[in-house]
Image: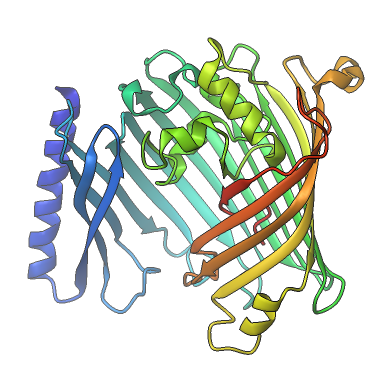
Amino acid sequence: MAYRNVITTVALLLLSLAAFAQDSDSYKLNFYPDAWYNDVDGVRIGAFVLGEMEGTYLDGPHRLNVGVWLGTKFPDLPVSYYFSFTEPLLPESSPGNEANLQLQSSVRTGLSSHSFSINKRLQPGFDELTFKKFTFSVITERMFDLDYRPYPLLWSDDDWKTFLKFNFIWSRNFEVGRFNLAASYALFSFGDIEITQQIHLSNDFKIRLRGFMGYNDPQGRNEYMYGRSYRPAAEWLDKGISRAKGTIPSSLLDEGLIHFTGGANLRGYTEQDFKELATRLAPLNYNFVASLNAEFEFPNPVGRMLEGSIVEDFVSFRSYLFGDTGTFSNEYYGRHLLNDVSHQFSDAGVGFQFSINIPNYLGMDRGFALRYEIPFWLSHPQNEPRFKFRNLIGIGAVISL
């Protein structure tokens, strides 16, 4: 009943905003239809509403992003929503150097999540890819319906949890290639750091590197634990493609044919991990991980065809050799971890990635990437040869630069 009251409140707020927009010559609301699918809601139909001051191009005051949907299977809670409102803090804001307050609230796919954030971006020049960004958030959330989760054992009890979270991003274009550092920490709970670097060897050959380290308190919640190939379960909800059961057929997940990026990203162990998730009574997860992902990019005929074309800035086709290695533990970081060889895994293979990207007004990626990869070598193949032909379809870039 509480969730229905929240949804009613959001609906009334939307009606009020629509009335305000009609009475204002300077505020504009844009409506976009939306449809999605998962096994619990069925076809979920609805609309997104983007609100902004006329002529500000999503970087002015009173920025609104709202979505409301109806599940056509009519589950226990058939109506779901997402709400975000962003307000710049003047005079601390300027193009590329904005400070703002952000309020977010959502009740969808079995999760009720609400947060308040303070964001500050620092851009020293005119290059949108050279910046620093700081975020402080207060977040409270509760998983109230595990029917949406493809693997419920990855989740803890359905009580409310509240935490303070800090995020930091530093991006810079060095002469050798682009560098990015992203770190997050939830007070007394979990945290991670990701460092990526692109190295241009020539116009045709590149090296991409990604280092990752993540930690969850040993007494922490299951959904923030790490797998070898997949990100913590709580982060699956960040993307619509992995947010709920059935959007990707469960049979493909259970067979380990689909890899979602994030966490340690040992993509060669996707099949082992997800077959274990589908059959084990308890998940095989770790509270500490340190990993390295590397890709050596080489030219291919399709990629060369796109060079010089009108779509070159938005569409790419990459081919690369890759290698992943990681160390995992359920203990505190220390000598025991370094000597525990049984928790060190590696893989290698070849991959191809097709991506479409239309950057936003800050130059940040806004698109999708699809990968086909062949992890032909595993250091721990279980009952298989170490060298074997294996198939993997990836969603998202493992090393995004």
Frontmost residue, 67 versus 249: 249
**Number of numbered discs:** 0
Residue 324 in view in this figure: no
* Residue for point 55% across, 59% down: 369
Where's the N terminus, which quadrant?
A: top left
Q: Which picture quadrant has residue 248?
A: top left
Using residue 356 as the reference point, say whether residue 345 is left or right of it.
right
Q: Position of residue 86 (x, y in %)?
A: 36, 55
Frontmost residue, 191 versus 36: 36
Q: Position of residue 385 (x, y in %)?
A: 81, 32
Where's the C terminus, which quadrant?
A: bottom right
Q: Which picture quadrant has residue 376?
A: top right
Using residue 388 as the reference point, say whether residue 258 is left or right of it.
left
* Residue for point 67% across, 51% down: 373
Using residue 385 as the reference point, say whether residue 32 is left or right of it.
left
Q: As displayed, is residue 336 above or below residue 207? A: above
Using residue 375 as the reference point, say whether residue 236 is left or right of it.
left
Frontmost residue, 318 versus 104: 318
Q: Position of residue 270 (x, y in %)?
A: 63, 35
* Residue for point 67% across, 76% down: 303
Q: As displayed, is residue 325 above or below residue 53? A: above
Q: As displayed, is residue 253 above or below residue 305? A: above
